[in-house]
Image (cartoon, grey):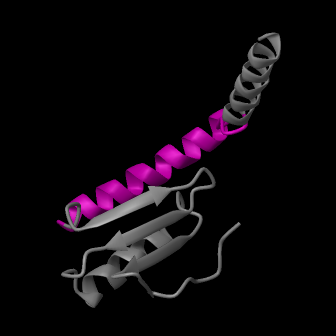
Amino acid sequence: MHRHYFFIAIINLLLLTACQSNELSPEEIALQDAADERVSSLLFEQNLDNHASYNVHKDGSVIIRFDRNVSSESYTDIVQKLRAAPEINSVYAEQGGQQVCPLNSIRK
């Protein structure tokens, strides 16, 4: 019976340790927040906030997926503006499971 509790304690310790390694530093949080604000603002301004989903990583890079009904002109314009934004490190864009606007060089 004691082995069972010991095993459970070890598993819980491992899970807690794994969760702690995913914490963001204050700098990463600020970078992620700035990039998120830029993406959401731009999508809203272009009336595409309901036609795209995105994920901002802790380094400020963005993965954005456009609905199939978004024109190539619209998503190209958005991606170019995002790549020019100083808050964003890089942009990977796709539509319908296919990459659009191939990735430019990543700014450091």
Which residue is at the far front? 1
Residue at point 53%, 57% (across, down): 87
Residue at point 40%, 73% (across, down): 81
**68 in relation to 12, above or below:** below
Residue at point 64%, 37% (across, down): 24
Residue 21 point in image, percent of width and height: 73, 37
Residue 103 point in image, percent of width and height: 56, 83
Residue 1 point in image, percent of width and height: 77, 11
Range shown magenta: 21-47
In terms of depth relative to the viewer, which is nearer, 81 or 73?
73
**22 in relation to 55, above or below:** above
In terms of depth relative to the viewer, which is nearer, 89 or 69?
69
- Where on the picture, by quarter, is residue 100? bottom left
- Where on the picture, by quarter, is residue 96? bottom left
**67 in relation to 5, above or below:** below
Res 80 seen here: no
In the image, taking residue 12 as reference, residue 74 lies left or right, namely left
- Magenta span includes 65: no
In the image, taking residue 91 as reference, residue 95 lies left or right, namely left
In the image, taking residue 55 as reference, residue 106 lies left or right, namely right
**4 in relation to 85, above or below:** above
Res 83 seen here: yes
Which residue is at the far top? 2
Q: Quadrant of the C terminus?
A: bottom right
Residue 17 point in image, percent of width and height: 75, 30
Predominant secondary structure, magenta span: helix
In the image, taking residue 9 as reference, residue 64 lies left or right, namely left
- Where on the picture, by quarter, is residue 40? bottom left
